[in-house]
Amino acid sequence: MKKWLLILLTAAAPLYAANEVSVQGKVGFFYPSDSDFQDIYGGGFIYGAEVDWRYIPMFDLYADAMYFSKGGKSLGKERHTRIKLLPVSLGLKVSVPLPGMEVYFGVAAKHFNLKIHNDSPYVSRNVTKNGFGWGAKAGVTVCLPCNFFFDIFLEYMRKKFDFNSSKRVITHVDVDVGGGVIGGSIGYRF
């Protein structure tokens, strides 16, 4: 029994050695990958926050949430529509330390909450969708004085939703609400 306890404590030692938490606010430019999404809304700014927990050296568990909201024109550019997209992630990052900085790569499961408001009698006025997708990101974290840091990142996320394109004629359209994000953040490591 003592042997197993010693093995367990030895295996858990890196958890106590790293155990850093960081928080960051981030902003980026979101460019949707779906051509229908691009035609209606185009790209725009996306805002978010992230919390990382370095549980062993070089490995972080992270959770983040981002928010994108933008108006657009649909149905031949005649009808106003607004989209609100909230992707929330839980993922793993692997960091490679370099002098004064880190390079990282991450993957995550993402939950997408989507709300669309349409000013058109031909399609549903309010649409809400929820579903799971995935994301991947890479970036560089530059260490600043007093435990602050600056981060530059690229991220790609993917989630397809099925939409009915009309109230009167039932046709299904798959739209990928994901896309690429290029951005930066500033944060603090505890």
Image: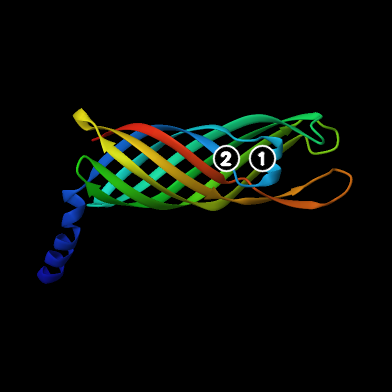
The one of 143 and 135 positioned closer to us in this rendering = 143
Q: Which amino acid type corresponds to the residue marked 2 in the rendered image? A: Tyr
- Give how far across and how far down residue 70 sits, in percent: 63, 30
Q: Residue at x 10, y 68 (%)?
A: 2
**Eyeballing the image, is 164 above or below 46?**
below
Question: Dot 2 surroundings within 10 Å: few (below 14), some, or many (20 or more)?
Answer: many
Question: Dot 1 surroundings within 10 Å: few (below 14), some, or many (20 or more)?
Answer: some
Q: Residue at x 67, y 35 (%)?
A: 41
Q: Residue at x 85, y 51 (%)?
A: 170
The one of 108 and 2 positioned closer to us in this rendering = 108
Q: Which amino acid type corresponds to the residue marked 1 in the rendered image? A: Gln
Give the residue pinned by disc 2.
31
Labelled pair 1, 2 in contact (Cβ < 8 Å):
yes
Q: Quadrant of the C terminus?
A: top left
Task: Determine whether, in the image, residue 120 is placed left or right of residue 68.
Answer: right
Quarter where residue 83 is shown = top right
- Give how far across and how far down residue 50 sits, in percent: 39, 38
Which dot marks residue 38?
A: 1
